[in-house]
Image (spheres, rainbow, N blue to C red):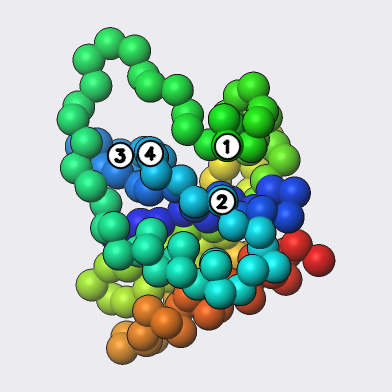
Amino acid sequence: MLSKYYLRNGSVYIPTVGRRGGAYATIEPVSVVPVTDTKGLRRAISDAIGRENVALPLLKGERPSAVLPKYARVKSWSAFARSSSSWNIVQNSGGYQIVGHRMHPDGYLIEDQNKKIEFPAGTTVDTVIDRMIAILQGAAL
């Protein structure tokens, strides 16, 4: 399971994440929550994790447009990415991870190994959500 979180201008953007073959894609619905709304963040993050990663049909032809720019009222994905910080929560057989990202010099997001948190096996999802909220609210300061 993979879920994605973007912090931009005091709001957290939480898209649904689907899986198309071996690749992940952000899709509707998208929650937009003020970073200061701890209760709202907890609910939105829990909902996003609960949706799992829906299977998406393989694409034939054009790629669909990115969903997040319209919520942030910017023209393109690159404009959104340049002005936001991003993290993922990953759940695999070994447990949970939170992985932060940074902008690559060529203009795309890559994992930042300095912003990676591995949780021990048996860590509850509530503990991971609490840590994600603390990271988002700390980054907004």
| Relative height, residue 11 to residue 135 (above, below) | above
How far, Cα to Cα, is label 2 from label 4? 13 Å
- Labels 2, 3: front one: 2
Which residue is disc 1 drawn over?
71
- Say whether marks 2 and 1 touch (CB < 8 Å): yes
- Say whether marks 3 and 4 touch (CB < 8 Å): no
At 61% from the left edge and 24% from the top edge, which residue is drawn?
76
Q: Residues within 10 Å of mark 3 (few under 14, many from 20)?
A: few
Residue 17, label in figure: none
How far, Cα to Cα, is label 3 from label 1? 23 Å
Q: Mark 2 or mark 4: which comes first in sequence?
A: 4
At 18% from the left edge and 30% from the top edge, which residue is drawn?
57
Q: Is residue 57 visible?
A: yes
At 69% from the left edge and 48% from the top edge, which residue is drawn?
8
Please tell me whether mark 2 sits on a helix, a strand or a loop: strand
Picture coordinates of residue 131 (x, y %)? 55, 78
- Say whether marks 2 and 4 touch (CB < 8 Å): no
Q: Is residue 132 visible?
A: no
Which residue is disc 3 drawn over?
23
Q: What's the residue type where badge 4 is placed? A: Ile
Please tell me whether mark 3 sits on a helix, a strand or a loop: strand
Q: Residues within 10 Å of mark 4 (few under 14, many from 20)?
A: some
| Relative height, residue 121 to residue 45 (above, below) | below
Q: Mark 2 or mark 3: which comes first in sequence?
A: 3
Q: What's the residue type where badge 2 is placed? A: Val
- The quarter holding residue 36 reads bottom right
Which residue is disc 2 drawn over?
32
Q: What's the residue type where badge 1 is placed? A: Tyr
Q: Mark 3 or mark 1: which comes first in sequence?
A: 3
- Labels 3, 4: front one: 4
- Whether residue 52 sits left or right of residue 103 in the image: it is left
